[in-house]
Image: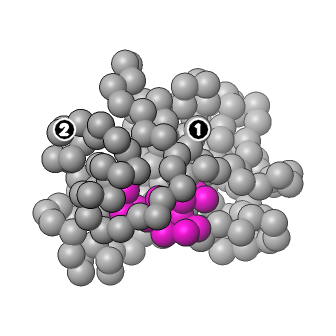
Amino acid sequence: MKKIFALPLTAGPFQPNWASIEANYPGTPQWLRDAKFGIWVHFGPQAAGESGDWMRINGEAIYGSKAWTKIGEGEMKNGKLKTLPGGRLDKRHAQFQFNAQDIRFTVGQDGYLYAFCMNVPEAGQTVTIHSVTSKTKRMSLLGYSGKLKWKQNADGLTVTYPKNGADLKTAAVFKIEQ
């Protein structure tokens, strides 16, 4: 997969307007300006203080990544994977709730599989990634230097979210080496 446009990590400040995007990402192509993803990149992870930090910690799972064989797993609605509502950004988006079992996947430039918990699990909570059925060699939590407790079984890959040391606020990303 070709990388079309790489967004740099910038210090901001960020404002909720296109002028801010142009100031922080000079030369932003029109397709990004027209896309919901462009809005998400700017107003999502980099728009809030700790979220910009989230991108510095987890950027390897996003920049230059490609889709895995499965987009994600978790709660199903009307026979489909639960996703954010479409349309313009409004109250529905702000009130939308994911849980720790709502997981999305990418494959990084480094070839590792990345599993995004769409919110941060509680300390000590176990999360099972059912789609990871092939043998896992190593697993880590981006932004956490401690050792994770995890095991692979017939249900998938089960990991216990650390009780201390992982001070993430928006989403947790697991790096999986198979």
The quarter of the picture where the N terminus appears is top left
Q: Position of residue 88 (x, y in %)?
A: 15, 66
Q: Nearer the viewer, mark 1 or mark 2?
A: 2
Instruction: Tell whether position 38 is magenta.
Output: no
Above or below, 111 relative to 151: above
Q: CA distance from mark 1 to mark 2?
A: 23 Å
> Label 2 crowding class (10 Å Cα cut-off): few <14, some 14-19, many 20+?
few
Please state if 149 lies on the left or on the right of 42 as rendered: right
Between disc 1 and disc 2, whose residue precedes? 2
Q: Quadrant of residue 143?
A: bottom right
* Callout 1 crowding tier (Cα within 10 Å): few <14, some 14–19, many ≥20: some
Prevailing SS of the magenta stretch: helix
Bounds of the magenta span? 42-54
Q: Which residue is mark 1?
A: 60
Can residue 101 be seen in the rendering of this structure?
no
Horizontal side of 78 relative to 166 (left or right) equals left
State the residue position of label 2. 31
Q: In the rendered structure, which amino acid carries the disc numbered 1? A: Glu
Identify which residue is drawn at 61% across, 25% down. Answer: 110
